[in-house]
């Protein structure tokens, strides 16, 4: 049996195990009423510290993380390490605001971030903006999980689209049946495989390549070569002075955006207790250490004999660097385990993302505008169907478009989702911003961010679109993450218009939340409301 056949056999076996676990999850912590979004879409809001750890880890660290981060390091060097400080910055931020979002959502039975915005500002339009943004930003993210699976299949020599179709048909089936319980349970397997893969790789591969000094010197020599498209070196082992703004703004902007994604919020709201959020955000930086090791795989791929040539022979697709590295360095049986970690690392977040997008559509579009009297069972059925459509849409997206285009489009996800930060995070602390000002600020930033991203060419390819996530800001004459620039515009517009609307005494809308809601840790039935009086809308 060839090495690829052995690896593929192990991947198929692991996929079968995950499938069985996914369907079995329907009977895990089984609820009396499965046809309720609290149950299907949030796992009954009953996950404790241990399960939340794996759910949030499986939610945030996806197959695209294990493919794209080292691929960026492989292609440009040190700039790809921005993902490490960003996952250090994010958790203190989430430690502060996520428990407040959990508490107010638990008190009022909110299932989505748009539910909170609707209740906080009394604004249908702002809630719709948050819901639509969440769905838009999530779609390419789901598609990119498929790109990660495609990279593994390509290296194993599996051709055609049928394996991808089968994988997502099975994923759709057990997600329909088990809801959020399926990815929560599978996350145990995923994280175990990932940790085993990284621990082995970080010791085994350098030993085979002659040590870290050889890896860094070889990688540095590769990166110092001149890129014929740009006339400049491909990259470097350190972040140069001209890249500092890009590096730091990517880290900060990505940190602010990460927990704005609906799937991350879903992982937070599924927790049983407020302290589970605090505890997990305190210990989740352990994943950051792992991510640093993951990034180093990019340098290992540059130093591994034959890997750069294989990547170049496959259209210079840097996403293939890590799978080819595993193929060259590991024995076939362990390469199969490593590939399984990537494949399962795609299935877990893809399931959570599709559920989160379905929750948004059902609660904040279908129920709000099409069927206000929808019963919990009806809402759950709609969410199940929409979850299926979201997966199907992502599959068609990947099969119809080139992987390069889908990856470039991912930058729009960050640009878009960060524009919900003022309404959600700022709204958890103050209601000073006017609802209409937030809508207009959101709209201006969305237009600016989308146009700027569209007009940003890939390095060395003038006239291309969606080619990079950073762009030059003329005022500062620095290259900055587009999403962060758009957020600044969003906040400035919202602040100026809020002052104008308040001076003109434009109605601010009713706030159904109270200050005590934001620190509550209610007991009893999940999602049950605690009788805390609401506060009236602020005047004018």
Image (cartoon, rainbow, N blue to C red):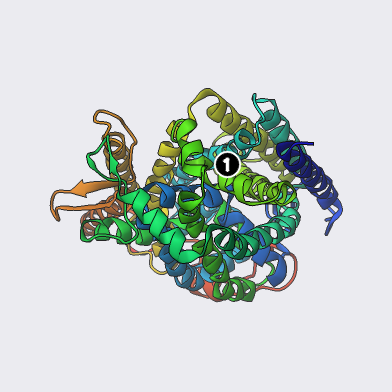
Secondary structure under badge 1? helix
Q: Position of residue 464 (x, y in %)?
A: 30, 29
- For the point 51% across and 37% down, the residue is 310
Q: Which quarter of the figure has residue 359?
A: top right
Q: Position of residue 334 (x, y in %)?
A: 71, 52
Foreground of the two, 328 or 471: 328
- For the point 58% across and 30% down, the residue is 393
Pointer 1: residues within 10 angstroms few (<14), some, or many (20+)?
A: many
Q: Is residue 380 left or right of residue 410?
A: right
Placement of 188 over or under 142, stated as above or below: below
Foreground of the two, 403 or 377: 403
Foreground of the two, 24 or 239: 239
Q: Quadrant of the C terminus?
A: bottom left
Placement of 525 over or under 348, stated as above or below: below
Q: Is residue 118 left or right of residue 462?
A: right
Q: Quadrant of the N terminus?
A: top right
> What residue would you read off at disc 1?
148
- For the point 54% across and 39% down, the residue is 365
Q: Position of residue 354 (x, y in %)?
A: 62, 42
Q: Position of residue 241 (x, y in %)?
A: 21, 61
Residue 137 can be seen in this image: no
Q: Is residue 10 left or right of residue 144?
A: right
Q: Is residue 156 left or right of residue 265?
A: right
Residue 178 can be seen in this image: yes
- For the point 68% across and 48% down, the residue is 335
């Amino acid at each position: 049996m060839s090495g690829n056949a052995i690896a593929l056999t192990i991947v198929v076996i692991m996929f079968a195990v995950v499938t069985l676990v996914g369907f079995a999850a329907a009977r895990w912590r089984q609820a009396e009423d499965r046809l309720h979004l609290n149950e299907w879409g949030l796992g009954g809001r009953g996950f404790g510290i241990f399960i939340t750890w794996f759910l949030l880890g499986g939610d945030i660290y996806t197959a695209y993380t294990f493919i794209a981060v080292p691929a960026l390091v492989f292609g440009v060097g040190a700039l790809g390490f921005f993902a490490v400080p960003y996952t250090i910055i994010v958790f203190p931020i989430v430690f502060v605001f996520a428990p407040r979002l959990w508490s107010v959502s638990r008190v009022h039975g909110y299932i989505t971030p748009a539910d909170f915005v609707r209740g906080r500002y009394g604004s249908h339009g702002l809630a719709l903006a948050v819901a639509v943004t969440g769905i838009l930003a999530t779609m390419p993210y789901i598609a990119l999980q498929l790109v990660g699976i495609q990279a593994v299949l390509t290296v194993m020599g599996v051709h055609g689209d049928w394996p991808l179709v089968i994988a997502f048909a099975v994923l759709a089936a057990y997600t329909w049946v088990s809801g959020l319980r399926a990815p929560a349970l599978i996350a145990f397997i995923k994280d175990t495989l990932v940790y085993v893969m990284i621990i082995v790789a970080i010791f085994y591969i350098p030993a085979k390549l002659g040590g870290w000094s050889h890896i860094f010197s070889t990688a540095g020599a590769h990166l110092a070569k001149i890129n014929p498209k740009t006339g400049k070196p491909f990259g470097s082992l350190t972040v140069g002075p001209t890249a500092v703004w890009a590096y730091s703004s990517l880290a900060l902007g990505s940190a602010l955006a990460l927990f704005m994604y609906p799937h991350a919020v879903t992982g937070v709201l599924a927790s049983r207790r407020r302290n589970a959020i605090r505890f997990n955000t305190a210990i989740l930086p352990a994943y950051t250490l792992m991510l640093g090791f993951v990034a180093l795989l990019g340098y290992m791929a540059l130093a591994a004999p034959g890997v750069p040539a294989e990547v170049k022979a496959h259209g210079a697709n840097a996403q293939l660097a890590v799978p080819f590295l595993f193929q060259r360095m590991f024995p076939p049986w362990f390469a199969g385990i490593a590939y399984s970690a990537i494949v399962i690392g795609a299935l877990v977040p893809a399931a959570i993302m599709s559920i989160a997008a379905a929750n948004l559509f059902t609660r904040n579009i279908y129920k709000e505008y099409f069927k206000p009297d929808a019963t919990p069972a009806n809402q759950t059925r709609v969410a199940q169907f929409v979850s299926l459509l979201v997966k199907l849409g992502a599959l068609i997206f990947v099969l119809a478009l080139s992987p390069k285009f889908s990856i470039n489009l991912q930058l729009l996800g960050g640009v878009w989702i960060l524009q919900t930060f003022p309404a959600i995070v700022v709204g958890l602390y103050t209601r000073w911003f006017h609802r209409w000002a937030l809508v207009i600020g959101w709209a201006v930033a969305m237009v600016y961010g989308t146009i700027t991203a569209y007009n940003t060419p890939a390095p060395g390819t003038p006239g291309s679109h969606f080619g990079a996530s950073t762009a030059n800001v003329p005022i500062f004459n620095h290259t900055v993450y587009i999403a962060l620039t758009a957020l600044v515009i969003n906040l400035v517009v919202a602040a100026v218009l809020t002052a104008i609307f308040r001076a003109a005494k434009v109605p601010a809308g009713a706030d159904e939340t109270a200050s005590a809601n934001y620190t509550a840790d209610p007991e009893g039935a999940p999602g049950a409301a605690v009788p805390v009086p609401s506060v009236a809308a602020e005047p004018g």
